[in-house]
Structure formats: C-alpha cells, structure tokens
Image (cartoon, helix red, strand yellow):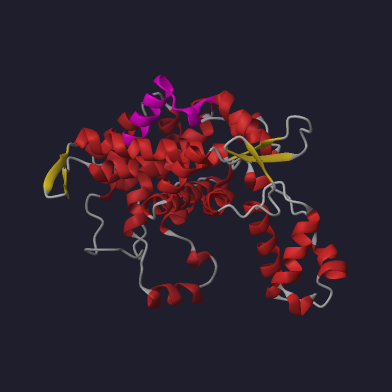
Amino acid sequence: GSEVDLMLKSRDPVGAMRLLVNLGLIDTVFPLPQNCLTNGSGSFGDVFQQGLSLLSATHGHLCDCKANPPMWCEAKRALEAGAVNGVGKEETRVLMEDEDARRLLWYAAFLKPLKSRTTSGDDDAEAETRKKPRKAKRSVILRLLVDELKRPIRDADQVEKIMNAADGFTKLVSMGSDISALSVLLSGAKVMHDRENRSKIACSMNTKTVEPDTEDDPVWLHCMEFRKNCSEVLRRIGPLWRAAFILSLCEQLMDAGNDELEYTIEGDVIEQTQEEIVSGIMNKYDVFAAAMMQLGLIGIWTQHPLVNGGEIKNSILTRIPEGPVFRDVMDEQTEWMTTHPGGSKEGLIEHLRATFPAFA
C-alpha cells in the first residue's frame, strides 16, 4: 500500500499505473473482494483499463490547468472567495499546491469505474446490505483500500467522498444547474464581505444591495436555489471539492469520447465535432465553478448555526420534543442560512416559528 502511495506521488502516476496494468500485476496489487456486487455483466473485465483512462484524462487536465489555470484554479482568487466564510489558505489551497489532495484524486480517478461497477441500484440488495454488521456494510472501495492496501481509514473515506461528490456535481450539471450558474454570472448576484465591516456578509445583484431577509426578486431566489443545491455537495466534501469537481469534469470529457453530436434547428441538421463538444463541457464547468465562488460558497462547510440547540429548546420552539424532529429543525436552519446569506438572527427565528408552528 505504501508503495502504491509513492507511485501516485511520483511525477508520472499514470505511467506507474500503466506499468502495473501492462505487466498483469494490477490484480495482485488491487485484489478485488470475491463477494462484491457487480453492476452489469457480472464480471469486472476491463474495469482497471477504464480506471487508467480516467486517471490519464484527469492527470492531463490538471496539467493543462497548471499551464493555463481557469479562474477557479487560481490561488489568489481561491483565498478571496474563501474569506467570505472565514477560511484561510489551508482550506482553500488549489490542487497544484496540495500534493496530498492530488494523491487522493489519483486514487479516486483510478478506482471510480470500479465503484460504478460495484454500486447496485437494486432496492432489495441495498436492504440486505443494511442488515449486515457495520464492517460488512463497507463499500468495495473501502475494503480494497483499508483491508488489502492497508491504507488509513481516513484516506479511504476521503477517496470515497471525492467519488461521491463528483457524482453530485455531475448530477447538478446534468439537471441544468449550469444554466442556473450562467444566470448567476449574468445577473451579477454576489455574496461577499461588507467592505466597511469585514465580519459581515453583503449581498448584491446588478451592483444593487440585496437585503437577504426580505428579498423576493425571482432571479435572486433562483440564484439562492442554486446556492443551496451546490452547498449540499460542498458540505459533504469540504476542502477537497476541487478534486471532486475535476473528476466530474473529466468523466464527462471521457464520455464525450470520439462522439459527434447531431441536432436539428429549424430543419437544418447541425453537427458538433468532438472538439466543440469538449469545449462546451469545459465552458459549462468553468461557469459553474465561477458562480459558486461568486456566491461565496467556498468554505461553507465551516458555517456555524446562528442559534444553537439550547436556544431553540428554551426560547424559540419551546414545545419541540426530543427525537428526529429536532434534526429537521437544525437542517431547516442550515437551509435558511444558505439561501439567506448574511441574514439576521431575528429573521431566522421568525422563519423557524412559521415553519414549525406546533412547537412555537
């Protein structure tokens, strides 16, 4: 396991993994559990070859970003974006400056096809998995990294989080959130530090100040819905969000492959070349990342609640019972703070009492 770490930390992690594949050693270094679920044909076949292709694409794209960094890969802009949530250099380091994050990304890229082939969409199978002891519930990725490669459980968890967050970003883009991101940039919606009071968050749209507690402009509300959707992914992945974002992007670039797209506009058949498709995908992701930074989402995983559990029980929702409903209230607070950045404590209390009148 430690030798694999050194291979992935080397200047050419793709070449190191390719050697293992070409020499037929990959099944020895990455022995697959015998009883893992398979999704599809029932055999893993060329899953490691697919992993090598994704690793190569991811490594190549990161090298391109180093030579010509997009806005969201610039260290200075990352630090400025993170300042909204009070996070510093350690929380906002870009991948080019973070060797450990890159190592985890290479693991995630190489093993992502394996995860896709060992994830079952069968409800009965998932229900059966929940009945198993905790250790037996672990995914194939965790078992491979921890039991076989003897990697720390923390590393294995982070690799799997990168994979899951990549799926989250892919889902958002496929659902049309890239269009929402474009509307964020075109409307000039921003969440930033107040210039006069650095401890306060200021919101604006089209250079006009926005009052987060009461703003009802449909465009602003749409931007805040985008902010909420992105925050759900970012809170799960934290500072490794760039690794997940690049993995999602490279999966889409690989899927584009050598395909050419044909579509019809007013009876005329329009063809898109592979180069145009790739350029379109990269533009989508650049817009998406720029919108997240403009809405002050970097570092949102460190956000603290405006009111704590004691305040809620003692003075806000005094009739609230113990149990799962309390988690619902705290989740509602998190959502309100996400869609009302810089909102007042009074506005939050009013919202909670209106949302949970039975407990007020």
Between residues 244 and 305, which one lies in front from this camera angle? 305
Between residues 7 and 301, which one lies in front from this camera angle? 301
Q: Quadrant of the N terminus?
A: top left
Between residues 126 and 254, which one lies in front from this camera angle? 254
Residue 271 percent across, percent down from the top left? 14, 41
Q: Which residues are magenta?
A: 57-74
Based on the picture, tell me whether residue 101 belongs to the magenta stretch.
no
Question: Does residue 245 appear left or right of residue 19 in this picture?
Answer: right
Residue positioned most to the right: 314
- For the point 73% across and 30% down, the residue is 195
Whether residue 241 is visible, yes or no, is: yes
- For the point 16% across and 49% down, the residue is 266
Whether residue 153 is visible, yes or no, is: no
Main SS of residues in magenta: helix
Q: Quadrant of the C terminus?
A: bottom right
Between residues 135 and 315, which one lies in front from this camera angle? 315
Residue 115 percent across, percent down from the top left? 37, 55
Based on the picture, tell me whether residue 65 belongs to the magenta stretch.
yes
Residue positioned most to the left: 268
Q: Quadrant of residue 197?
A: top right
Question: Does residue 58 appear left or right of residue 225 in this picture?
Answer: left
Above-or-below relation of 311 to 127: above
Residue 9 percent across, percent down from the top left? 45, 29
- For the point 58% across and 41% down, the residue is 295
Above-or-below relation of 204 to 324: above
Question: Does residue 347 appear left or right of residue 283 in this picture?
Answer: right
Question: Does residue 201 appear left or right of residue 24 in this picture?
Answer: right
Above-or-below relation of 91 to 76: below
Above-or-below relation of 33 to 261: below
Q: Quadrant of residue 125?
A: bottom left
- For the point 43% across and 23% down, the residue is 66
Mark count: 0
